[in-house]
Image: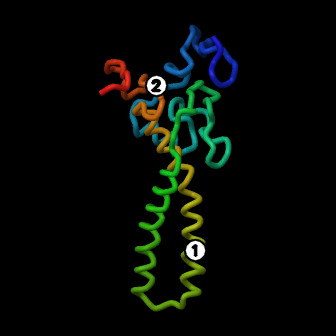
Amino acid sequence: MIGPFDGRPSSFAGPIGGLRDVVNEPAGPRPGSLLQALGRAVRNRCPACGTARLFPKFLKPMLVCSACRQDWSAQRADDFPAYVAILLTGHIIVPAVIVVEQFGDPPMWVHLALWLPLATVLMIGLLQPIKGTIIAIQWWFGMHGFRPGSPARREGPPHDGSS
């Protein structure tokens, strides 16, 4: 059977031998917990195996992991990473502005020279790790088209979408 994204067979020989299902059983070590999957995603690694990069470009995730063949096309992070990055940046910058104002009354150009570059660097620096974290959460809990065979649901009954 041909895989949905790259024309490769849907099963392949794993590193130890035997056939593995491309979507449900990646070849790499599965994360033992949600925190481990999140840690991998924050470091720009595949949350499923931790070996391949999650983002080949700045905010464009891989469609399929090159190491474990996990399908990432189901992710729907949309604008949520930007909202979280804005929230975190504001919670870092605003207290710093208040502290600076408490110790003196700097002119406006000092505020512009100090806070605009810092806010820009924080926003750009936080976007990719936050997006990776949101993708890992969606995958772990089987949200937005990810198969219910994710680690969090493996022991439970099959999820057919009706509750």
Give the answer, above or below, for where 130 lies relative to 148: below
Q: Quadrant of the C terminus?
A: top left
Q: Quadrant of residue 19?
A: top right
* x and y, in percent, of residue 20 in the image: 55, 13
Q: Residue furthest top?
A: 18
- Amino acid type for the residue under numbered disc 1: Leu
Q: What's the residue at 54%, 33% (across, down)?
A: 50
Q: Residue furthest left?
A: 163
Give the answer, above or below, for where 62 lies relative to 103: above
- Amino acid type for the residue under numbered disc 2: Arg
- Look at the numbered disc 2 and give the secondary structure of its residue: loop
* x and y, in percent, of residue 91 in the image: 42, 66
- Look at the numbered disc 1 and give the secondary structure of its residue: helix
Q: Quadrant of the N terminus?
A: top right
Q: What's the residue at 59%, 87% (across, down)?
A: 109
* x and y, in percent, of residue 94 in the image: 43, 73
Q: Residues within 10 Å of mark 2 (few under 14, many from 20)?
A: some
Figure colour scheme: rainbow
For the residues labelled 1 and 2, say whether their Cβ atoms are less than 8 Å apart: no
Q: What's the residue at 40%, 40% (across, down)?
A: 35
Alpha carbons under labels 1 and 2: distance apart: 42 Å
Res 116 label: 1
Mark 1 vs mark 2: in front = 2
Q: Residue furthest front?
A: 162
Res 46 label: none
Nearest the camera: 47 or 163? 163
Q: Residues within 10 Å of mark 1 (few under 14, many from 20)?
A: few
Res 147 label: 2
* x and y, in percent, of residue 142 in the image: 42, 30
